[in-house]
Image: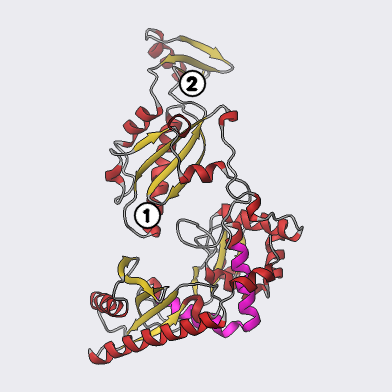
Amino acid sequence: MKDINELLFLFRPDSAEEESIRKITDFIFEKILSYCRDNNIDAEPVLVGSVAKGTNLKDGDIDVFVRFDRKYARAKMEKWGLSIGHIVLRDGKEKYAEHPYVTGFMNEKKVDIVPCYRMDQGEKKLSSVDRTPLHTEYVKSKLNLEGKDEVRKLKLFMKYIGVYGADARISGFSGYICELLIINMGDFHRTIEAFAAMRGKLVIGDPENTDSFDSPAIVIDPTDKTRNAAAAISVENLSRMKFCSRLYLNGRLPEYNQYNGQRKDTKDRGTNLSIFRIKKPDIMDDILYPQVMRFKNAIWEIMERNDLRPVSWEVCVKDHIDVVIESENKAVPALKIHQGPPVDEPSSLDFYNKWMNMEISRGPYILGDRIYVDLIRQQKSIDDVVREGLKNVNIGKNIDDQKEAMEIFDPYDTGKDSCALDLFLSKFIFRAHPP
């Protein structure tokens, strides 16, 4: 990996970008304030996120929240929020999280205009986004200029090893968590040392608050003691952070381009690769990815039930949704060894009587302390088994209607490529995208 200070120099916003951000936010604020004055709306814009906190990397997004008085009904607040968003971003698109919001571009900068309610410290939130301005205020009060650059270093490191981002696609470390880590641990190097030495969970906060959570990572939100700000972090990404921190401290973290584009096929493993492809709906990643994982899990469970012996997987969402699953078997084995009860159990006699006069391959017979029979079954392909098995499984309200049109293929037999296959065949401990 390149020297972290060199990366900071490359990816810290320069003065020209900072001036561009200032002009854009000034324009947005004036538009919002003017609309609220003209329509007698008690609301004001507030800059939030990494740009507001000064921890942003080059080409970061601009997040502007419109804080409404709590007296307004939710429906009215959301309607005004969308109207304001479209006035600011003429070509903006509506997206939906807990609140609908408008996203678009201004001077080639991505901008989100998000409505929320005003919320003071200790006040009950009316929606989950209401506390975001409090995050901004807290971080600004705790970080000086040097601390902000330490956060940037940590973000760059996490991007480098592929664990940055709390969305459902990544299940990693959010920008806010990076900021809280630096606030609690002091600087980038001490944070890396802490992860390198860590065993078990990441826990930051008083036991009276942390003990109520059962997650791989627990970081109590200083603006809301009942919230685990690190709930999105998967055990795999926490493990990756620990291991790569150890590699980094030992000078062993490889350059990204050492693995860039490398693909090691699976033919020498004697296994089968199947790719399951469906159409991608136009919805937010945080809504889509849980459904994609449900899709993958459903296929995996169907293959396990039918003795296809799945061993590994990968998913990728781009123009479509691709799931690749490696399995030991390409078709349902003709022979199934059916295990009965221990011979000491009275039910062993029932098992014997049931199978004695049925058409089976072998048995009943005793092996060890149990009774068994060998069954012959119809050999079915992965295609047949998965299509049949998915008929009675709902894989998600936005993708379930795509099951019938699902494409299933072997990439080696068909020569078709897939982004999921690229990820699968280049899967190393260190697999990431450079910042």
Image point 49% across, 26% down: which residue?
329
Q: Secondary structure at mark 1?
A: helix
Residue 11 vs residue 345, the one in the foreground: 11
> Residue at label 2?
339
Residue 357 screen position, x and y as percent: 37, 7
Location of residue 327 with respect to 83 vertically, above or below: above
Q: Amino acid at mark 1?
A: Leu
Q: Is residue 411 visible?
A: yes
> Residue at label 1?
288
Residue 15 vs residue 144, the one in the foreground: 15
- Left or right side of 30 for 334: right
Image point 58% across, 41% down: which residue?
263
Q: Residue 251's quadrant in the figure?
A: bottom right
Please provide the residue range marked out in magenta.
130-158
Q: Is residue 140 magenta?
A: yes
Residue 311 screen position, x and y as percent: 53, 35
Image point 36% across, 76% down: which residue?
113
